Each structure stands twice: as C-alpha cells, then as structure tokens.
Amino acid sequence: MTIVPEIEGRIVEVGGVENQYVEKGHLLFRLDDTQYQVRGAQAQAEVASARLDVERLKGGLRQVRVRSTGGRPGAELRADTFDRQDALQKRGVVAQSVSTKRG
C-alpha cells in the first residue's frame, strides 16, 4: 500500500516500522507543525487588527454623526436605532413601516 500525504511537512516522528500491522487511528507519522502554528498566529493577529480598525472607524462615525447633528445628545441614539432597525428590516425581521420611522 502506498501512503501519500495531503499536506507537505517535515516528518518529526514515525509511529511504527516498515511492514508493521497497524489499526485504524494508529499514528503513522507526525509532521513538524511550526509553519502552521506561525500561520495561525499571523491570521489571528490580522483578525484582531481588523477588529480594532472596525472599532476605530465606528468611533469616527459616531463623532461625525454628533457633529452633523449639532451635538444633540439624542441624535446619535436615534441614528443608531434607525441603522439597527434598517438592518433588521433588510433581514425581514421587522416590517418596513417600523424601520422607516426615524426618531
């Protein structure tokens, strides 16, 4: 029988010897997973960075909304409520008549 890997990697451990009988689930080879660990950590860092960017942009949007409404305290809440209702309406959760009422 020929064994072919699905991924590339350096073998760091062999779980048996040639022509040894093995059962399902028996370790055949262990690959060095360093490169995969690094890639995973990089991907997690990119996701965290993107989340920070989103939060920063949301903060900037809030400031713009407050400035555009003359700093009226309830204006930002009304805008947020409208945006939330609009998103729900687009998903079909609330009726259009409810989501178009602003303030």
Image: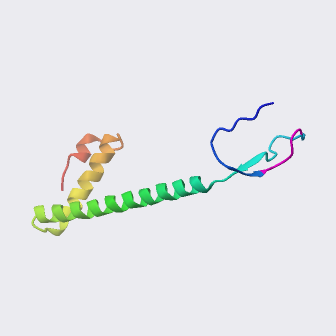
Judged by its main secondary structure, the magenta piece is loop
Q: Which residues are magenta?
A: 14-19
Left or right side of 18 for 77: left
**Rendered image quadrant of residue 47:** bottom left
Magenta-drawn stretch contains 33: no
User: Quick check: 54 left or right of 62?
Assistant: right
* Number of marks in the rendered image: 0
Residue at x 25%, y 58% (from the top left corner): 80
* Quadrant in which residue 61 is drawn: bottom left
Residue placed at 90% from the left, 41% from the top? 20
Task: Inspect the magenta stretch and tell me whether residue 17 lies in it.
Answer: yes
**Seen from this angle, which residue lies furthest left?**
70
Image location of residue 24, percent across then percent down: 82, 40
For the C terminus, the quadrant is bottom left
Front residue (pair 19, 22): 19
Q: Is residue 69 left or right of residue 4?
A: left
